[in-house]
Amino acid sequence: MTLTQLNYIITIAETKSINKAAGQLYVSQPSLTSAVRELEKELGITLFHRSGRGVTLTNDGAEFLLYARQLYGQYETILEKYGKNGSLKKKFGVSTQHYSFAVKAFVDMAKQFDMSKYEFALRETKTAEVIQDVSTMKSEIGILYLSEFNRKSLERLLRPAGLEFHRLIDCKAYVYLWKNHPLASEPSICFRQLEEYPCLAFEQGDNSSFYLAEEILATNEYPRIIRANDRATMLNLMVGLNGYTLCSGIICEELNGNEFAAVPFQDDEENHNSVMEIGYIVRKNTILSKMGEMYLDALKRYLDIRE
């Protein structure tokens, strides 16, 4: 097994096509196919299902891909730091679901460093990518939540990826909306009151499971729903369309402004208000960097203020 073969597997999995991968890797299709077959023979497993529509990972292939990404990611990190054109800048990254408090903590941490000597990255992204980024060490820390609804499914993703979840805070769900929304002054809001307004949800990608949703009640049939990729777009839709989303209720006015409100969600027999256990994920048996420790300290300080 070689690093080149690992790169081949990763690229084929991402493009879902031998032809596209060959073009991207600047190798011939026969050479690429041969390299994959040699690796499959060495491992004693089949990595891809091949059809006229392209290639898809087998179960063995999906599991192998996790390890391949981890190993190749470590190689790229070493190359970037110590290679011919490498940089000696220290790197630190966080991948997170769309939480303004996670951004606020990042800002507070980064301000304490000379940014000319460090390379920082903050990735607000899909739930599956948060897990993948930490698994492959693209990011040191990931921020997401568990609940009664998604816990078992997410733990099944975390375990084989070598990740562990650490609780930070428990939150009941809130309805997050524009302060001039017709319901913004209500003491609490139930699902029935929201029927005439568009529900806003963060996009989780094609064929994504309900369990990867950032919002509770993801399995509900919403008469009006709009999906967005980023927080700024979602806030604009709240203002323009009187949309709403279901969130933790932890709002950072310093970053999001004071134009929005979080109203307690009132559950009923059919729509239960699940507790959102917000926490962070890291690789097992990992000693956090100085930046990682300072980021978590900043996160805990902010969340303590909000409790």
Image: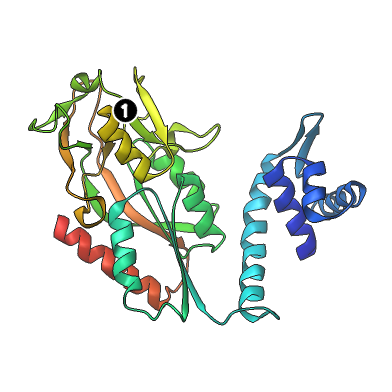
- Mark 1 burial class by Cα count in 10 Å: few <14, some 14-19, many 20+: many
User: Residue 292 vs residue 263: left or right?
Assistant: right
Q: Is residue 267 left or right of residue 16?
A: left
Please report the residue visible at 18 percent of the width from the left and 43 percent of the height from the top. Answer: 259
> Is residue 279 something that shows in the picture?
yes
Q: Quadrant of residue 8?
A: bottom right
Res 159 visible: no
Question: Which residue type carries mark 1?
Answer: Cys
Residue located 36% across and 48% down the image? 98
**Element on which disc 1 rests:** strand
Q: Is residue 230 left or right of residue 299?
A: right
Q: Residue at x 39, y 28 (%)?
A: 226
> Residue lying farthest front?
240
**Residue that carries the numbered disc 1 in the rendered image:** 199
Above/below status of 241 relative to 30: above
- Residue 191 placement: quadrant: top left
Classify 50 as above or below 101. above
Q: Nearer the viewer, residue 276 or 183?
A: 183
Q: Position of residue 305 (x, y in %)?
A: 15, 60
Residue 303 drawn above or below residue 110: above
The percent coordinates of residue 293 (x first, y second) are 35, 73
